[in-house]
Amino acid sequence: MSLSHDQIARVARLARIDLRPEEAAAVLDRLNRVLDLVDQMQAVDTRGIEPMSYPLDAKMTVVQRLRPDVVSEADQHALFQSVAPATEDGLYLVPKVIE
């Protein structure tokens, strides 16, 4: 599948993208390459191949490196509440908007 200049202009208009005429050819080329890649992937015969929930071998033990869970900022709850228009019991009060 490949797109035409008119289709590129329509997509740009629908997406509210200001696409100048001198940019249209480059965009057309890039989008057509993406669509060609999609066509190639769809042409691959995947019958008999089980879907994978994870891209690595299920027998592998994958460990995610995590950073230490430490507080990096001071508690500013009281400061934030002090400038709020209305609070009660540590909660922000807002006007009722739905009857």
Image (cartoon, helix red, strand yellow):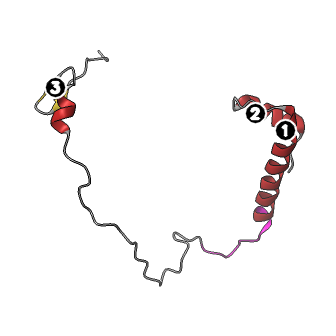
Using the numbered discs, state the Cα–Cα distance from disc 2 to disc 3 in whole angstroms. Answer: 46 Å
Using the numbered discs, state the Cα–Cα distance from disc 1 to disc 2 in whole angstroms. Answer: 9 Å
Q: Looking at the image, is mark 1 or mark 2 earlier in the sequence?
A: 2
Badge 3: how crowded within 10 Å, few (<14), some, or many (20+)? few
Badge 1: how crowded within 10 Å, few (<14), some, or many (20+)? some
Badge 2: how crowded within 10 Å, few (<14), some, or many (20+)? some
Name the foreground residue: 97 vs 70: 70
**Label 1 is placed on what type of residue?**
Ala
Using the numbered discs, state the Cα–Cα distance from disc 1 to disc 3 in whole angstroms. Answer: 54 Å
Q: Looking at the image, is mark 2 or mark 3 earlier in the sequence?
A: 2
Question: Image point 43% across, 78% down: which residue?
Answer: 62
Q: Is residue 9 above or below residue 1?
A: above
Question: Is residue 17 one of those drawn in magenta?
Answer: no
**Label 3 is placed on what type of residue?**
Thr
The answer to whether the residues at label 1 and label 3 have Cβ atoms under 8 Å apart is: no
Name the foreground residue: 90 vs 22: 22
